[in-house]
Amino acid sequence: MSVSSKTWTFSNMGGDKMSEQDKKIADTFERVMPTMSELDKERLLAFGEGMAFMAQMQKDRQQDDAPR
């Protein structure tokens, strides 16, 4: 994600590798970020970090359960 003063862009998020749904999500956040309060941004960040943490835990569990 690249950020310039007061302008959010998600141009560095993967380009051609992004699915249509990924692009829709990025476009939505690109539109809404400038209008969000700092508190709402902190909440969104905490939610995203929680999702990333849970995804990593699930990935780690799958690797632990994989036959060796």
Image (cartoon, rainbow, N blue to C red):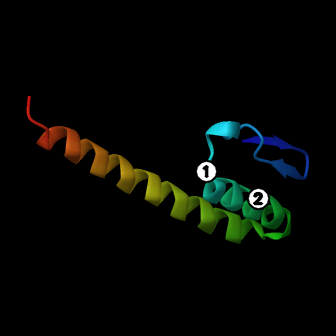
Q: Position of residue 65 (x, y in %)?
A: 12, 43
Query: Along the horizontal axis of the image, is 33 left or right of 53?
Result: right
Instruction: For mark 2, give the secondary structure.
Output: helix
* Tag in front: 1 or 2: 1
Relative to 2, 19 lies left or right? left
Q: In which quarter of the image is residue 39?
A: bottom right
Answer few, some or many: residues within 10 Å of disc 1's Cα (few below 14, many 20 plus, some between 14 and 19): few
Residue 14 visible in image: no
Please give the label number shown on residue 27.
2
| Earlier sequence position, callout 1 versus callout 2 | 1
Please tell me which residue is depicted at 63% across the width and 45% down the height of the picture.
18
Where does label 1 land, which residue?
A: 19
Q: In which quarter of the image is the C terminus?
A: top left
Position in image of residue 51 (x %, y %): 45, 59
Quick check: 21 above or below 63? Answer: below
Q: Residues within 10 Å of mark 2 (few under 14, many from 20)?
A: some
Residue at point 69%, 64% (across, down): 41
**Quadrant, the N terminus:** top right
